[in-house]
Structures are given as C-alpha cells and as structure tokens.
Image: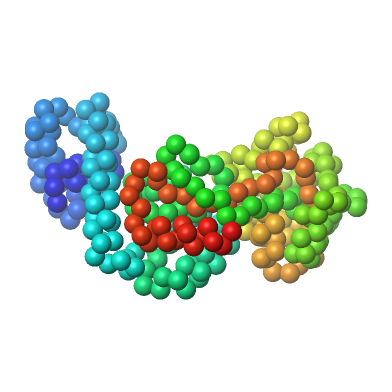
Amino acid sequence: MTGREYVYTVYEEKSFSAAAKKLFMTQPALSAAVKKVEQELGLPIFDRSHSPLRLTDAGRAYIEATEKIFQIEKNLQRFVNDLAELESGNLVIGGTNFVTACFLPRLIKNFNEQHPNIHISVIESSSAELFAGLKQGTIDLVIDSGECNTKEFESLTFFTDRIMLAVPKALAPENESAFSQQDISAGKHLQVSAPIARLQDFQDIPFLLLGKGNDMYRRTMELFREAEITPHVRLYLNQLMTAYHMTAAGLGATFLTDTLIRMAAPNDLLNYYLLDHPLLEREIFIAVPRSSYHPRAIQAFWASVAQSR
C-alpha cells in the first residue's frame, strides 16, 4: 500500500489503533508511515490532541485530493476493464431496504437476460450511506426514492409510488372514502373519481411513523405541519415493512406506498385512504455520479431500466 492509502485508512477509522488492526500491521509502523507523508507534505494531517482524530486544515485538503485521485484511478481501471472485458465485469448496486426488495428483483432479471456475464452485488443501507458510497466509488449505482442532489448525481425516474394512509379498521372513522387492499391492487385509487380523505379526520388516532433521516419522515411531517396537526406518535420505526406489520397488529395508523400494499400478503385488517397532496407521490429512481467514467456495465443497466419504464 502507498502512504496515501495508509493516511486515508486512518481518516476512515478515526484512530491509528483501529486503522492498524484493519491493515494487519502494528500501530508504530502505521504511525511511522503517516509521519513520513506529513513530513513530505510539510504540515500535519491529523490533530492528535483529539479523540477521535480530527483533520487539520492541511489534512482536509489532503483527503479531498486523495478522494479525487482514488476516483481517477478507479475510472482508469474501469476504462481498461471495458476495453479488455467488453460485456463481462462487476456491478455494485446500492438501495434502501424497501426499494431494493420491491423493485430491484425485476430490474436485475431484465438486465441479466440481456447481459448474463456481468456479476451483480447488492448493498442495502440508508440513503445517506448509499450516496456516500456512490460518491466514493464503492457503489456503482444507487436505486432510491426521495431527494437526489442533481449537481452531483444524474438520475433516471422509472416508477412513481402513491403514498396512502393505512388505518386499522378498529380505529378507522366511519366514512365512505376507504379503500381495501383489493381496491389498491385493482388501481381504483388511481382513478380520477377516487374519493379523497382529510387528514384532520384521523388526528386523534395514534401514528406509527418512520424516523428522522428517512424520506417518508420528511414527507409526513410536512403533511402534518400544513394540516396544522400535532400527531400522537406511538412509535418511530426504521423500515416501511415493519410499519405495515405494526399497523396490521392494530397499534396505530401509518403511511404506506401502494406498491407495498399490493405486494403484502392478503389481509382485511386495514383501511387505506387517499389524501390529496403532491408529497404523496414519490419517484423511484436510479442515480450515478455525474463526474465519473461510467463503464459499459453501468451504461447497460441504465439503458435496461430506461426500457422498462
């Protein structure tokens, strides 16, 4: 490994001991390697007076330059691999749990039928970690919902989800605007004449919401704010499928996408309601970095998704 790689590992691990363990080397040897880089630079890279380690001003500039160098090296290797391997190679796709489970199987199946020699790996994580991996080059392509920084990433929308309010029948108010799971599967909620419910009619019901950092949290909190409602939140959860099962158990109301409702096991425990708000339409997209060289595997997957829209 190079001195630059030693420094970057210390930066990632935020300590010399953790970095040494990851690199299978002694801490004194790693410290000496980093010290040599700092001497060549003429300034310290790490502020060793803090735990975890912090970067100095020079260190931040060094790490930023290092990430650009790593990206250039990766792009060069990708280009060479394309020339040598043509339709073979690897593709790392990242996605959130729900989006990966609901949409990725079909996309991979369509892609594999056209490009059977490309090996695909899937990474499931939060949106923030996925886009960090996309930026660093550890992930080739992200499939996600929510917001995308269009300055850094190029995106392609291939599906639109409709978010609906799901309420246990035992807690649901009496009105004629409820949909069943069968109605959702038949697409009745998408008809122009579909009945619209008011969020105010459900304000006394406990809610099960996805937590901060989740795109669904941002949307639902804005929905409550505009309706001038302070919801009684019984639980904050991490996954949409967990929210579905908790709601089916009668613990409270939640917001679900019509895709999940259609894919869930048949049940008649819940009523579903259509609310009228732009935030309740959610785009599902794939994204790649704008500044990177895109190998043929990525280009081919992009084209395959575009054809499936």
Q: Position of residue 31 (x, y in %)?
A: 13, 41
Q: Position of residue 77 (x, y in %)?
A: 24, 55
Q: Is residue 288 left or right of residue 200?
A: left
Q: Residue at x 24, y 52 (%)?
A: 76
In front here: 120 or 241?
Answer: 120
Q: Is residue 222 left or right of residue 297?
A: right
For residue 205, say whether it is visible: yes
Q: Position of residue 183 (x, y in %)?
A: 80, 62
In front here: 291 or 37?
Answer: 291
Q: Position of residue 37 (x, y in %)?
A: 12, 37
- Indicate how the structure is coloured in the image: rainbow
Q: Residue at x 61, y 55 (%)?
A: 159
Query: Residue 28 falls in which quadrant of the image?
Result: top left
Query: Residue 47 falls in which quadrant of the image?
Result: top left
Please say if 104 is above or below 57: below
- Number of marks present in the image shown: 0
Q: Residue at x 75, y 50 (%)?
A: 165
For residue 105, say whether it is visible: no
Q: Residue at x 61, y 42 (%)?
A: 217
The C terminus, quarter of image = bottom right
Q: Is residue 199 left or right of residue 241?
A: right
Q: Is residue 263 left or right of residue 268?
A: left
Please say if 289 is above or below 109: above
